Amino acid sequence: MARHLWRFIVGGLLIAAGALGIMLCTAGTAAAQEVEIPGVGIIELPNEIQIPAGLPGIQVRPGFERPMSTAPLRIELQTETGPQYDVPVGPLVIGPAEPESPVLSEEESMRLTALEAARSRLGADYRAGSNGPDSFDCSGLVQWSYEQAGVDVPRTSYEQAATGTPVAIDELEPGDLVTFYGGGHSALYAGDGEVIHASTEGQGVEISPIDSMPVTGARRL
């Protein structure tokens, strides 16, 4: 706030000094005084300009009575050196920090690997008795997918319905085995209420809502 006040005062003095100094120097009658302003420096003003009383810190140097030159204004600016601080420099972070990825257990990682293997075969043909890699029946897709994760799974859907550990439908996790039609159809839970399965002749491997078929149960391998 004080700095802005000094700038305002100095600006007014300089404008007045410039106009008056030019007129006085032209007439050859100008004499100058030195005025020291805190935080600004020393300025040279014609004696005819009166410095307002009551301005804290302003000093008028007496005895400076030489005639002013044709360039009547002289300013000696002061430089201020503020306190120095050591600022610790750390890594630059822009935006919110990314959340750490959850650490998966070996079983979770295995199930997700099997699910991604099944996802990679979306669009493959359905063929009864086939277990990949170019065509599948329902249980063949489940078996092939888990083989890619290093896990042996029984071949038929009825055998698959009896393997692993039972899990409630509302507690399904991606990669869990889901059986339908009393154990006659197998699929892998894909998350968000959907399953990946080798559907039927003419449709092949696809994603379907889990409630599009009658669910028999689910198993976690």
Image: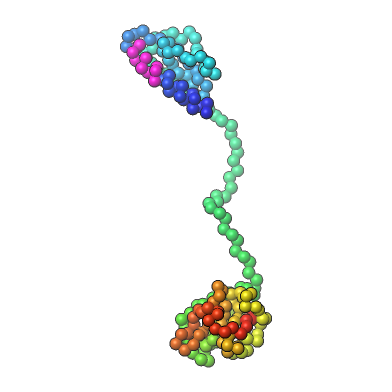
Instruction: Name the residue located 61 percent from the left edge and 85 percent from the top edge.
Output: 216
Q: Quadrant of residue 74?
A: top left
Q: Quadrant of residue 160?
A: bottom right
Q: Is residue 184 left or right of residue 44?
A: right
Instruction: Name the residue located 60 percent from the left edge and 43 percent from the top edge.
Output: 88
Total tally of numbered discs in the picture: 0
Q: Position of residue 77 (x, y in %)?
A: 47, 23
User: Residue extending furthest right?
Assistant: 165
Instruction: Name the residue located 50 percent from the left edge and 85 percent from the top edge.
Output: 199
User: Residue extending furthest bottom?
Assistant: 129
Q: Nearer the viewer, residue 188 or 124?
A: 188
Up-down: is 107 above or below 137? above
Q: Position of residue 133 (x, y in %)?
A: 50, 84
Q: Nearer the viewer, residue 85 or 21?
A: 21
User: Residue extending furthest left?
Assistant: 26
Q: Quadrant of residue 151?
A: bottom right
Q: Position of residue 4 (x, y in %)?
A: 49, 27
Is residue 32 visible to us here? no
Stretch of the chain drawn in magenta: 15-25
Residue 104 magenta:
no
Instruction: Name the residue located 50 percent from the left edge and 12 percent from the top edge.
Output: 61
Q: Is residue 160 left or right of residue 49?
A: right
